Amino acid sequence: MSAPVLTIDGPSGSGKGTIARLLAKRLGWHLLDSGALYRITALAAQRRGIDLQDAAAIAKLAAHLDVRFVGEDETCVLLDGEDVSLLIRSEQAGEAASVIAAHRSVREALLEFQRDFAAAPGLVADGRDMGTVVFPDAPVKIYLDASAEVRGARRYKQLNEKGLDANLAQIIDDIRRRDERDMQRAVAPLKAADDAHVIDSSFLTVEQVLAECLALAGV
Ligand code: C5P
């Protein structure tokens, strides 16, 4: 491995995206948002009219994706040069990502691309299988969890703040369904690596989680 890697895995809504971004900033390290890669791959497939179940066609597409993460904190995503950062954040894009992420060949096609993000001075890698599959030798692995109810309530609040209509029960249902698919799939299922530190963020603030992660990173 060319540079130190800190992995953060966990279900959607656990706060790992926020924590990964803050950690990368604090450490001065690069950031890999692997979920964005799956979301972009799904978007690119849909734009080309490829069926989301057509694993071979999507894997081929994934192997040649023109994706770049730009901006100061590397959170602006370009697909074929177009800024799709907002477009890939919809519930529908997350759902499509979860469908194509279940294809083994698609995951394999994205593997080396993800590993190439490990560059000096270090990498914070956010996803579902960062500690188990993509960076199994990472010296620090974190698994961030929270109950489906708490994650649903966070999502509900976010949508309300954006002035969007939302139904809490429906959101919690959707979260449970996505967890189920991510945890039950045959390839790279969502689970904590044996050597991961598990943090339940249900009743912690962002600052508390960040402090715990920094302590684990030795900062
Ligand atoms: O983290 P995010 O919600 O952006 O991920 C979207 C979907 O992509 C997840 O529900 C999951 O199915 C898939 N994913 C994955 N492996 C990763 C990151 C995301 O399977 N490392």
Image (cartoon, rainbow, N blue to C red):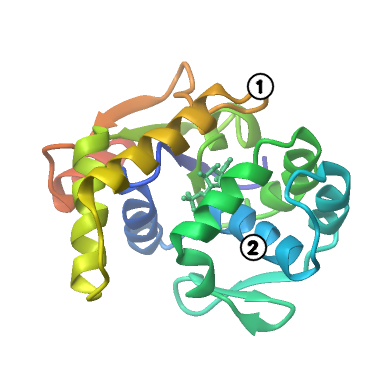
Residue 186 is labelled as: 1
The span from disc 1 to disc 2 (Cα, nearest Å) is 22 Å
User: What amino acid is at disc 2?
Assistant: Ile
Instruction: Out of 9 and 30, give the one closest to the viewer.
Output: 9
Task: Identify which residue is drawn at 13% across, 41% down.
Answer: 204
Instruction: Out of 38 and 90, give the one closest to the viewer.
Output: 90
Residue 77 at x, y percent in the picture: 57, 73
Instruction: Out of 14 and 209, give the one closest to the viewer.
Output: 14
Residue 110 at x, y percent in the picture: 74, 48
Q: How would you rate the neighbour count of disc 2 (Cα within 10 Å): few for under 14, some for 14-19, many for 20 or more?
A: many
In what element is the residue under mark 2?
helix
Q: How would you rate the neighbour count of disc 1 (Cα within 10 Å): few for under 14, some for 14-19, many for 20 or more?
A: few
Choose the circle earlier in sequence order: 1 or 2: 2
Question: For the residue with label 2, is its CB less than 8 Å from the closest atom of ligand 1?
Answer: no
Residue 40 is labelled as: 2
Task: Identify which residue is drawn at 47% across, 16% down.
Answer: 194
